[in-house]
Each structure stands twice: as C-alpha cells, then as structure tokens.
Amino acid sequence: MAPQSPVLQYSLSVNSVSQHLFDVTLSIPAIDSEHLTLSLPGWIPGSYMVRDFSRNIVNFSATNSKGQPIEVTLLDKQQWQLTTSGEAAEVTYQVYAFDLSVRSAYINDEYAFCNGTSVFVSVSGFEHLPCELVIKSPASKPDWQIETTLPHLEDNRFISADYDELIDHPIFIGECTSADFEVDGVTFTLMFSGTTEYDMPRLCADLEKVCQHHLSLFGKPYPVKHYLFMTLIANEGYGGLEHRSSTALLFPRFELPLAGEPEELSDSYVNFISLCSHELFHTWHVKRIKPDVMVVPDLSQETYTDQLWIYEGFTSFYDDVTLARVGVIPPERYFKIVAQNLTRLYKNAGRFKQSIAESSFYAWNKFYKQDAGSINHIVSYYNKGGIVALGLDILLRERSNNQYNLDDLMRLLWAQYGDESGTPANVIEQLCRDELNVEVKEYLDAVVYGTEDVAMDSLLEHIGVSQTVQTPLSLQDKGGDEAAGKVSPRYDFGAVTKDADTGLVIQAVLEDSAACQAGLQINDKLIAVDSYVVSTKLLQRLLTVPNDKPLALSVIRDGRLLNLTLPLLPAQAQSCVLKITDEEKAAAWLGR
C-alpha cells in the first residue's frame, strides 16, 4: 500500500471585525529540506494586475514542532524562507482585510470574505500536496455561516487536491440569504450577503434559463455538480470574478428587485443577470479553456498573453445575447444594449491607436490602470472583443451557408482545449479554417491585430438589423435611442464631466474635440459659460441653440482663474442606434 501524501493544514479565522483582521495558520509536515520557501501570489487569476497582496500580511512568524521560534528570512516582498532543518513547522500570520472588491479580502460587521490568493501562502515546490482547511467564525458572531465550494469534509473542515484548488474557491463567512435551484442535475446556489429580502423566485427563474443555455451550449459532461453565485451586497460597487465552481460578485444593495415589488425589467436587473451570465460562462471559457501561458501561470509576476479578446470579448458577447436567446429580455432590448456597446466604442479614439490583441497584452499596465487619458489611447478587449465576436458569428454563418456559427466554434474550443491544455495565439483562425472550412484570417488581421472597425452595417444587414450613427441626444447619451422628433446638441463639447457643488469638473478631454481646442484639461473646474454659473443642463442648452460666436468659459485650474474660448464645432456622429428591419431574420439569428 502506497504511503499517503503529507497534507498541508491551514486554518482561517476572523481575529477582529473592527480591525478587519484574519488569523491564518499553516501547519507543514516534516519535509526533507533544510529550508522551505513560502510565497503569496502577487495577482489573482482573472484579474490581470499585480496587486501585491502581501502588503496586507502582518505578524508573520514560525515555530518548530516543539513550539520554538525558527528563523524566517524575507527573500522579497512576497516570499519568506524558513529554516526548518527537515522538521515540521507551524506558520502564523494575520491578514488585513478591508478591500471591498471581488479580488481580495474584506471584513465588516456583516461578513468576512476572502480569496485564497489574499490569505493562503504556498510552500514552494510542494504546491501539489493536498491541503486541509479549518474555517472558524468569530466568537462574537456565532450565527455566521460559511459559504464556499471547496470540497467539504465535515463541520467547518474542507479539503483541496492541491494549492491551485485551494485558492480557486472564494470563502464567505457571515450573514446571508440564499436559494437553490437545479438544472439538469447541477445544483446552483444564489447567495446574497446581509439580510435584505430580494425577489428570489424571479431571480432564480431567470438565472435558471441562463444556466440551462450555457450547459446546453457546451454539453455533457458538465464541469461542475454545484455552482455558487456568491454575491457581496454593498451600498455601491460592481464587479465579478470567475472561479472553477463559483463566482464572487459585487452589486449595489437596492438595485436588485425586493421581495413583493412589481416586476420591472430595469437596467440594473438586466445588468445583474448579464453579470451572472458572464461569470458562469467563464466556468468553461477561462477556467478550463484558457490561453497556453495561463495553464500554469506565474502568480508572482505578470503573465502576458494577447488572447484576452478571445476570453473576455467572446464572453462579453455571450453574456447579453444569452438573455435574449432565453427570453429574459426581448430582441429590441438586446439590440439596444449592443447599440450602447457600439456607442461606447465609437466614442473611444483609442481604438485607432491600439488593437485588441495589444490591449490584451498590455492589460497589466494599461487596461487595468486606466486614467483620464485612456479614452484617447487604449481600447477595451471586453468592449471591442464582444463586437468582434458578434461580427465573427455573422461571418461564420454567411461563409458556411448557415452551417456553422460561433456556438460551433465554442464547442470546438471546449472539445479540443477544455482539458486545460491551453490555446495557442492563432486558435480562432486555425479552428475556423481547419474544422469549419471558413477562412477568417483577413477579418481577424483587420479588427483584432489591426485597428479597423468591424463593418457593422453590412454584417448586421444579414440578420435583419440596421445601424444608424447619429449625433448624441444629450451630453450623457449612451446610445440606443432614435433621434426622431428629439432636439439634440448641434455643437460638440468633447469632455467627460461630473457635477460639482458649483459648476462641472472635467474628468477627460477627447482629442480633437471642441473642449480640446478650447484648452480644457483634466481636473479643471468649469464654473461658468458666458458669465453664467454652469450646470450640465445649462451647458447642453447652450450647445443646442443656434449661435454665431464661441462660448466664453470661466475655469479654475489648480487655484488659478482662467478664461478660455470654446469653438462652435458641429456635433460628432458617435451615438449608435440599431433597429430590427426584418423580424423573421432577427428572430432566427437569436434562435427564438
């Protein structure tokens, strides 16, 4: 009988709610080595930015099996060397947890939440060893419950096959409400932190349709038997991060339907179901199908790939189209969402300077570190990647005489790369050519590796939809609404603003716009136009009425009062409207 592998034993407990501290203990069995190196990841898979989680570790110490201190040498910002001399050791440390996001760790009076990448150190060279974890609620919160998809042993004990599995299951300890539903043998749990009572039957009914769609798309055998939508509720905040059998979500408290409220298809409700759809899709497409370099990523530093447009872009296409396919939203609502996505892209001058392949590669220091100038210099591989996926779906249908579409490509990806073998950079071109007998190299070279726009006019025509690009209806126009019968600004402004107590604060200035020519800069406070205290409403009115002379701007910049002149330039056509012109074609494309 083969000897059992040694087990790394972790414990996680809440030390202080008010001080936001976790206590972590790691018991390491005797390993035949003079020294052991422990390390904490610098980033979390799915979020491509080095976050230096080790900055939150305090009171790091180690003892031997006799309880005597052993030498700990700090090798770098996230590695510790223990002098164990081949003996068992116990490591203890605390983690400061006050980052309200889905990426790190957070403790408040309602709950404690963490990702393993923020709290569990690994033993370098022994990441393959199985791990046991004991999770303890704080003594002051005896009613707090534990939610995680880590394999459960008993009571508050959990196990993982290795370190990689240990850190791929977020952990929630606290007050929560939840509901289960089953789809084709898979149990799904929808969980919300806190005690707010939501319309769970409606939420679960709509999510059930989404889950059925994704399961059916990829087919059996399913990669999970239980899936958890772990939702952190806050006054403000938004986000989602995928894991192998769960997702951590963050959503505003009162933007979800409350129990007993009349049903309304609000934007926030659609956003939540779409967010769930997006993260669940990643269960296949990111967690199993993944870029070759992400099969065994180096979590201590950046791991570069130019394939994120395939993973986040394709998923961004499926998150919304799924809602239309299964009837959560009507076709008109779906195409309005696509129009808004196109509007966001058309307002982004950076799309002509950076390809989405480059955007993927530079995610670490550009996309995830955006500033006020980003709109002029970079493009989103989520946003344009979703548009590229839409175009590719139509292209596949047209060039194969409706024999193949993007669903077929996704199933090929799952069949050939769902074993986590990793996709090469040319995987989309290669699969389309070799498996579907459709050549897409020219398309990908233009819109993925180049900076050309997707030819939406001609592509959408094939599915019974027309595109109109018009001048914005307002300074906050997101697109999707027709201009017919509406008065819109006739002059360009070209800056992103937010309201201040008096006037407007300039958050971004679009290149070659009227605001740019006027000399407006980021963080300027625009206090008056033509000597009148300005608001968004007044500025829009002044840009709408006919005028034969430039507007005088009064601006405070870094404590100085400046007088600038806004030239009257024609408003730019950047707002997209999509309209169904052939209901039969559009319905057929959506599979309705």
Image: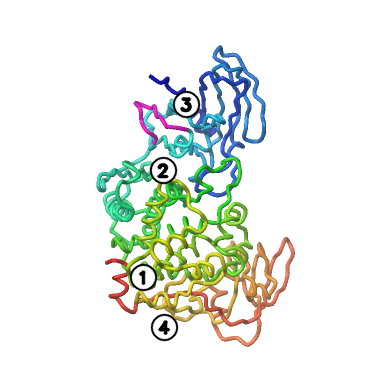
* Most foreground residue, 12 or 507: 12
Marked residue nearer the N-terminal end (4 or 1): 1
Which secondary structure lies at badge 3? Answer: strand
N-terminal of the pair, mark 4 or mark 2, is 2
Mark closest to the chain's N terminus, 4 or 3:
3
Residue 83 lies, in percent from the top left, at 63, 21
- Quadrant in which the N terminus appears: top left
Please state if 521 lies on the left or on the right of 21 as rendered: right
Q: Is residue 584 above or below residue 393?
A: below
Badge 4 element: loop
* Mark 2 or mark 3, whichever is nearer to me: 2
> Looking at the image, which residue is at 53% across and 61% down?
380
Mark 4, mark 3: which one is toward the viewer?
3
Q: Secondary structure at mark 1?
A: loop
Residue under pointer 1: 400
Q: Which residue is mark 3?
A: 11
The amino acid type found where label 1 is placed reads Ser
First in sequence: mark 3 vs mark 1: 3
